[in-house]
Image: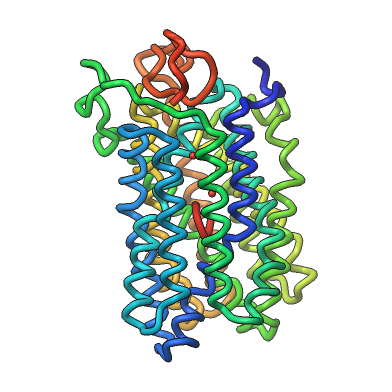
Amino acid sequence: MSNADPLPRTVRLLLLTRVVNRLGAFSLPFLAALIHAEHGASLTTAGAVTSAFGLATIPSRLAGGRLADRIGRRTTIVLGLCGCAAAQLAIAASTSLAQSVVAAILLGLAFELYEPPSQAIIGESVPARQRVRAFSLFSAALAAGGMGAGLLAALLGHRDLRWLFIADAATCLACALLIRLALPRDRPAPPGPAEGDDAVRPLRDRALLGLLATGTAYALVNQQTVMTLPLALARRGLPAADAGLLFTAAAATTVLAQPLVRTARVNRLPASVALALAHLLLAAGLAGYALAPTLPALLAPTAVWALGDLLVTGRVHALVTDLAPPGGTGRYLAVFGTGWGIAATFAPVLGTQLLARAGTATLWCTMAAVCLLLAALHLRGAPRAQRGGRPREAARPRAGAATGARAGGRPPRRCGGAGCGR
């Protein structure tokens, strides 16, 4: 199978559900606004609730990985999506600040159950040479849905912020139904002597912990372009709403640049070089934010950092998949994904403090400097994509592989950003 061959049906189904789910995944950025407007909470309190949500996503990730490897990918995905829907309906129906806080924490606890099994299905469904492309397409599907999500958010948000959470819950339930009906049921086999918990210890894998450290730093930078950008624009005298146009430009870049990840030249790059190049692009884009004075001038650096973001996403998830031992893909991806929960917890404080104390230019220059440091660290070398001297594709098939024919004819053994991704 070449890199240009069609992806398996299961992966294409997950891409479709990610687009559908992302169309409704616009509620989370409005969580603080809803708490502030509907329950009279101070901005500080609303921000603390958002941070509590981010903190709750960390155990959610870990639970998602363990459940994916224990009870199956499909069951974990459906459980996470239904949990998200229930929590979002509870937020919409809340009549007090206390009810909203409890519902927000419950949303965080369900929010990331879906991500590790989805990523595990992609990593296990395609050969190693197609993993970068598959994970990049997963990000592109998220971006494509996001372009329509902003328009729906504008339409519903003007009526009542609660409708955002109701619509998001509806898309979660729709995706859960699609996954339940269309994804093959997986029956994880009992772990063998070499595949039990003793063989899957992600927190003892130095290579994974190294990727977790650099991935958390990257996530902290990434979250500034989501959480702090509107405030940075306002500080420069531009409408905060213009951030939506920049988000759309970034999403369009992610979609249009997909052919780039399929080129032979890019695929031949070693992982360390590709990740270093990606972080150099991120640094260049963020430095451009520090210098650009107008909205049109901000479009070019937005496209540059979005391209770097695309290259990071595909490579790093493929690397984590390659590092995982048989039967441990879900748990490895879950541990790696906790970096996003850490970033969601601390990024708002870091960004707002830099912005308030040092200004816009310093904020973006600091983020660019972090990306330059990450580029240098990646050039020192990425983890090998092999275990025990053999490629993952040549290893013994693991229990619960996602798609395709399996030994003995057993049936194979996740949808994605804000709102579920989720």
To which quarter of the image does residue 415 belong? top right
Most extreme residue toward the top is 408
Question: Where is 132 relative to 367, above or below?
Answer: above
Residue 355 in view of the camera: yes
Residue name at image x 54 percent, y 18 percent: 404
Residue name at image x 39 percent, y 51 percent: 339
Q: Nearer the viewer, residue 9 or 138?
A: 9
Q: Nearer the viewer, residue 216 or 98?
A: 98
Residue name at image x 44 percent, y 82 percent: 35
**49 displayed left or right of 225:** left
Q: Position of residue 17 (x, y in %)?
A: 60, 45
Residue 301 in view of the camera: no
Q: Position of residue 178 (x, y in %)?
A: 57, 42
Q: Quadrant of the N terminus?
A: top right
Residue name at image x 51 percent, y 65 percent: 366
To which quarter of the image does residue 278 belong? top right
Q: How is the image coloured?
A: rainbow
**43 displayed left or right of 196:** right
**116 displayed left or right of 267:** left
Q: Position of residue 413 (x, y in %)?
A: 43, 26
Q: Position of residue 296 (x, y in %)?
A: 80, 70
